[in-house]
């Protein structure tokens, strides 16, 4: 069982949202990316580049906070980190990054629920999804 699915099972959420995607085990919705590229052209590609910088910055903040430890669901820092994870999920969905979206939402839920034992595992999964997303976005940019 993958960590996203494990986090989903712990949080009582399924990963049905990944079933309708089109690339790399449901991680990327290439059709959505191409559709939005056709509508936005080079501006969409520039936005994708901006997203990568945003994603990297958010991951640095999340990683630093989680490495310090002690996040609990009602703690102000935990609320901020959960909100950052939620924002990353929403932004990732703009580019068809279903893996990032799902992993970020799992991290958000895990932080909000104060499940200390699972937070690091969910962060590791999100880091992996972000690395794959960088590769996907680079490939899509090169092909466009």
Image (spheres, rainbow, N blue to C red):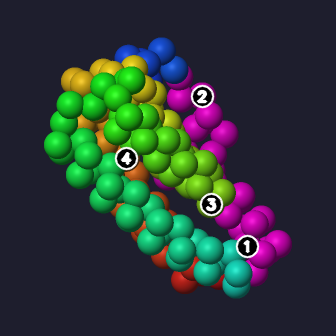
**Is residue 46 in the magenta section?**
no
Q: According to the image, label 3 marks what residue?
A: 95
Q: Which residues are magenta?
A: 14-41
- The crowd level at tag 1 (other Cα within 10 Å; few <14, some 14-19, many 20+) is some
Element marked by disc 3: loop
* Number of other residues with Cα within 10 Å of mark 3, as a class: few under 14, some 14 to 19, many 20 or more: many
**Image x and y of residue 92, in percent:** 56, 54
Count of numbered badges drawn on the protein: 4
Query: SS of the residue at dot 1?
Result: helix
Task: Say which of 31 and 87 sits in front.
Answer: 87
Is 94 positioned to the left or the right of 61 in the image?
right
Disc 4 on helix, strand or loop?
helix
Q: Which residue is mark 1?
A: 37
Helix, strand or loop for disc 2: helix
Above or below residue 143? Residue 115 is: above
Marks 3 and 2 sit apart, C-alpha to C-alpha, by: 19 Å
Q: Which residue is mark 4?
A: 126
Of labels 3 and 2, earlier in sequence is 2
Sequence order check: which comes first, mark 4 or mark 2?
Answer: 2
Residue plotted at (58% across, 38% down):
18
Which of the numbered marks, if any, corresponds to residue 16? Answer: 2
């Amino acid at each position: 069982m993958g960590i996203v699915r494990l986090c989903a099972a712990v949080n009582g959420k399924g990963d049905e949202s990944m079933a309708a995607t089109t690339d790399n085990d449901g991680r990327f919705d290439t059709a959505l990316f191409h559709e939005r590229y056709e509508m936005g052209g080079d501006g969409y590609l520039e936005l994708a580049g901006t997203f990568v910088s945003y994603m990297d910055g958010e991951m640095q903040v999340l990683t630093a906070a989680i490495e310090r430890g002690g996040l609990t669901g009602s703690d102000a820092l935990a609320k901020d980190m959960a909100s950052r994870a939620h924002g990353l999920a929403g932004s990732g969905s703009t580019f068809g990054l279903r893996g990032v979206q799902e992993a970020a939402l799992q991290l958000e839920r895990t932080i909000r629920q104060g499940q200390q034992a699972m937070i690091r595992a969910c962060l590791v999964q999100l880091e992996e999804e972000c690395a794959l997303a960088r590769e996907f976005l680079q490939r899509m940019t090169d092909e466009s």
